[in-house]
Image (tube, helix red, strand yellow):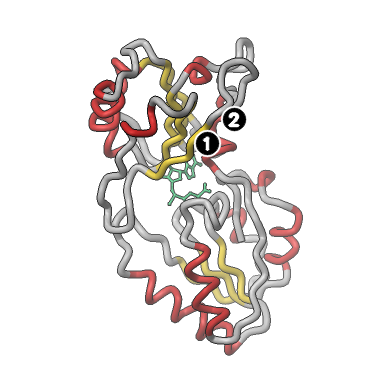
Amino acid sequence: MGAGPGALDLLTLRARDRLLEADAVVYDRLVAPEVIALAPASAERFDVGKGPGDSHRQAFINELLVELSARHERVVRLKGGDPFIFGRGAEEVEVLRARGVEVEIVPGLSSLLSAPALAGIALTTRGVSRRVALVSAVGEGGEPTPVGDLATHVDTLVVAMGSGRRREIAEELRAAGLELETPVASVEWASWPDQRVRWGTLEELGDWTGRAPAVLVVGDVARGVEGARE
Ligand SMILES: C[S@@+](CC[C@H](N)C(=O)[O-])C[C@H]1O[C@@H](n2cnc3c(N)ncnc32)[C@H](O)[C@@H]1O
């Protein structure tokens, strides 16, 4: 199940209903305590939050889900945003189905789409952006994802997990031909009480510091919608 970007009222009604009936909840780092609190007090709770590159825990999580499914009727696996957008949800589903466990997939509001909206950025502004790419700045083992090759093929880049790589991303995009004045915005902790939006240009991006989690938006839409900017 996806928990959305954080705020309790951005959880879907279906996700809420499943949580209310959960026998066990296995949740990630970016799931708000208010969301987990919806599960009955009697439900078993497991915090399996991983840091970036901490992927060796995946095998442990898979086994935990299999083991819990053998003991309980309703096990909720709760992930930030949407479980199938850079969330490794597919791998867990495959493992469970291979072991004969019945799985229901409950989508969530991905931070890659909702963080920009919460900041007042319309990813597909008419006449400005018709091609949007979603990018995870780092791969499985923490290795960087190239972004330069994409830069000139889309109107807007939405980058997750890029906080530790702002300088390299800025350099790659520059080298690929993007102008220094290209608008850039970083939306940190979207929908959480300390949400913060940083507005600027590609020239400034490399020097930005800030707190993860953040979604980075690159392209003309990153100026924000007049009057709706956070
Ligand atoms: C492993 S990915 C998971 C994405 C998640 N499945 C989704 O659909 O939102 C984690 C990255 O999502 C982004 N992220 C998640 N929650 C966020 C939030 N509330 N505000 C800003 N970025 C967020 C950050 O880029 C973070 O590094």
Q: Is residue 1 left or right of residue 205?
A: right
The answer to whether mark 1 and mark 2 are in CB contact below 8 A is yes
Q: Quadrant of the C terminus?
A: top right
Depth check: 43 or 49 in front? 49
Depth check: 84 or 41 in front? 84
Depth check: 204 or 26 in front? 204
Q: Position of residue 89 (x, y in %)?
A: 52, 63
Q: Position of residue 35 (x, y in %)?
A: 61, 55
Q: Position of residue 226 (x, y in %)?
A: 61, 10
Could you tell me which residue is drawn at 47 percent across and 68 percent down? 91
Q: Quadrant of the N terminus?
A: bottom right
Q: Is residue 144 left or right of residue 2?
A: left
Could you tell me which residue is drawn at 50 percent across and 86 percent down? 67
Could you tell me which residue is drawn at 58 percent across and 26 percent down? 130
Provide the secondary structure element on which disc 1 rests.
loop
**According to the image, label 1 marks what residue?**
190
Provide the secondary structure element on which disc 2 rests.
helix
Identify the image quadrant of residue 54. bottom left
Q: Amino acid at mark 1?
A: Ala
Residue 65 higher or lower than 5, as above or below: below
Q: Position of residue 159 (x, y in %)?
A: 42, 37
Depth check: 178 or 140 in front? 178
Q: Is mark 2 within 8 Å of ligand 1?
A: no
Identify the image quadrant of residue 63. bottom left
Q: Is mark 1 within 8 Å of ligand 1?
A: yes
Could you tell me which residue is drawn at 27 percent across and 45 percent down? 144
**According to the image, label 2 marks what residue?**
118
Return the disc, 1 or 2, that comes first in the chain's sequence: 2
Q: Amino acid at mark 2?
A: Leu
Crowdedness near tag 1: few (<14), some (14–19) or many (≥20) residues, C-alpha within 10 Å: many
Q: Which mark is residue 163?
A: none
Residues at marks 1 and 2, CA–CA distance in whole angstroms: 7 Å
